[in-house]
Image (spheres, helix red, strand yellow):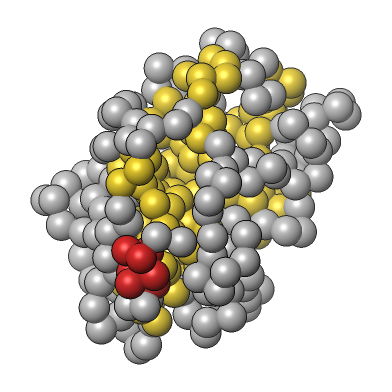
Amino acid sequence: MPPVFLAACAVCLFASGEAFAAQTTRPSTQSAAFELVGRIQAPAIRESSGVAASRRFPGVYWTHNDGGPLSSIYAITREGRLLAEFPVQARNIDWEDIAIDESGHLYLADIGNNSARRRSVLVHQLDEPDPAQPVQPLRPRRTWELRYPAEPFDAESLFIIADYGYMISKNRDFSPARVYRFALDPAGEKQILQPLTTLPLRTPVIAADGRRLAVMTVTGPALFHIDPDAPDLALCPAWQTTFLDPLAEGLCFTTDGDLLATTEGRRIVVFPRRLDEQEPDGKR
């Protein structure tokens, strides 16, 4: 690991109370390395606002539209071919992201709030369907109603780690994005979001796989390592790659550990996992 990464990891911050005492530093920039692997071919997918790699069905990716009359999730391949469309029995007010956990659950993030008029937002949990089976409408098994701790804000990103869901604010005033969380406890389906920390990056398109957190910025993806043993979210900067596409919307880690992004222009781009990538404890 380069010395700058070691220095950055030495200042990893741990949540305490309502917020971190200071802000996580920005990762250093590396040269670009990405591959255009496909284009979303389904006309019904107007804007792939979020994407998640299936843990149960190899080669399957889940995506959805950003708001509008269509309340469906779509199973596509890495190259963008449509496998199946599943209607969801939940209104699409402003679906901004989709996440997945280790138990085969999908999470639809109805968290968009462009005008800041919504006093609360919703996250729906679904059982992941089998794209090869006959299509049946999906009913959310659980829905969390999440209220803001202060003024309402817009958000476009959700990720799941262990027993918590995490949301990232989208700030239009060039201030750092703020990280919030909520418990996945069955008894807590109505909650107030808990503020944790800020990210030194403004663009809030996020991916996480339990040990790594990737953020798509206006200049490309940035990667942080997560300490899974910390009582709260802890991030160590790793690297940032240049990728100039302001229309990137969805981001996820593949089952191979690569980073996959979808864009408003229907492109599907993969950033291969760096061979020199090391975690703070020296593990690869």
In the image, is 34 to the left or to the right of 139? left
Q: Quadrant of the C terminus?
A: bottom right
Extreme left residue here? 173
Image point 25% across, 72% down: which residue? 23
| Quadrant of residue 183 within the rendered picture | bottom right
Left or right: where does residue 156 sit relative to residue 23?
Answer: right
Residue furthest bottom as drawn: 17
Residue at 63% x, 19% y: name it. 79
Give how far across and how far down residue 185 sits, in percent: 62, 75
Q: Is residue 182 visible?
A: no
Between 79 and 186, the one nearer to me in the picture: 79
Q: Number of numbered discs present? A: 0
Q: Tell which of 153 and 163 is nearer to you.
A: 163
Which quadrant holds residue 236? bottom left
Compared to residue 87, the image places residue 56 above or below, namely below
User: Is 119 left, or right, of 231 in this rendering?
Assistant: left
Q: Identify which residue is drawn at 37% across, 87% down.
A: 16
Which residue is rendered at x = 33% and y = 72% of the image? 7
Give the residue furthest to the right.
133
Q: Is residue 254 visible?
A: yes
- Compared to residue 2, the image places residue 272 above or below, namely above
Residues 25 and 80: in front is: 25
The one of 27 and 69 positioned closer to us in this rendering: 27
Residue 258 coordinates in the image, percent (x, y):
59, 41
Q: Position of residue 9 (x, y in %)?
A: 39, 72
Q: Position of residue 37 (x, y in %)?
A: 57, 19
